[in-house]
Image (cartoon, rainbow, N blue to C red):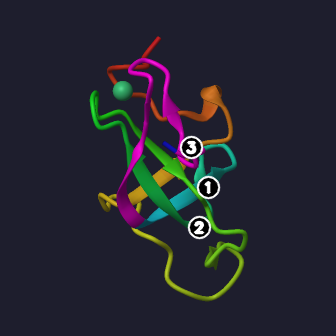
Amino acid sequence: MSQPILPICVKCNLEMRPDTNGVTVLLMAYDPPQPYEAYDADLVKCPNCDMQVVVGAAYNAFWMHFHEGTQPDIAKENVFPVYENVKSLPTTEENER
Ligand SMILES: [Zn+2]
């Protein structure tokens, strides 16, 4: 055993394992939410319950809404939108209220 460097799953008491390197964190801002900035990050997963967490976002954004360049496709599997707060979450069957 060595010092854990990845998140710990509190349900399973296990250190998470690398799952996918090079996913995209897409920060969403404004109301209604629009893509604002995008960062490279990694996806880790609990080896027991498969809970996934995005970690290790890069310090610098690789895309910003006010610069030229291609906006990441929010519909892609490896793009994870992150909203400013609970209120700005898109309505789904799970969080509808
Ligand atoms: Zn777990």
Judge left or right: residue 51 versus residue 4. left
Which type of secondary structure does the marked residue at label 2 adopt? strand
Q: Amino acid at mark 1?
A: Leu
Q: Say left or right for 29 vs 25.
A: right
Judged from this view, the residue extending furthest toward the top is 97
Q: Is residue 80 a member of the stretch shown in magenta?
A: no
Q: Is mark 1 within 8 Å of ligand 1?
A: no
Magenta span: 2-21
The amino acid marked with disc number 3 is Pro
Q: Residue at x 52, y 63 (%)?
A: 41
Name the N-terminal-most of marks 1 and 2.
1
Q: 43 above or below 70?
A: above
Contact flag, marks 1 and 2 (Cβ < 8 Å) = yes
Q: Quadrant of residue 47?
A: top left
How far apart marks 1 and 3 lie (CA) works out to 27 Å
Residue located at (42% from left, 17% from top): 11
Query: Mark 2 = which residue?
Result: 38
Q: Residue at x 36, y 20 (%)?
A: 94
Q: Is mark 2 within 8 Å of ligand 1?
A: no
Other-residue count near label 2 (Cα within 10 Å), few / some / many at <14 / 14–19 / ≥20: many
12 within the magenta span = yes
Q: Position of residue 91 (x, y in %)?
A: 43, 28
Residue 35 lies, in percent from the top left, at: 58, 60
- In the image, residue 94 above or below residue 89: above
Ligand 1, image quadrant it occupies? top left
| Residue designated by label 1 | 27
Which labelled disc corresponds to residue 4? 3
Q: Are marks 3 and 2 in contact (CB under 8 Å)?
A: no
Where residue 2 sits in the image (x, y, percent)?
54, 46
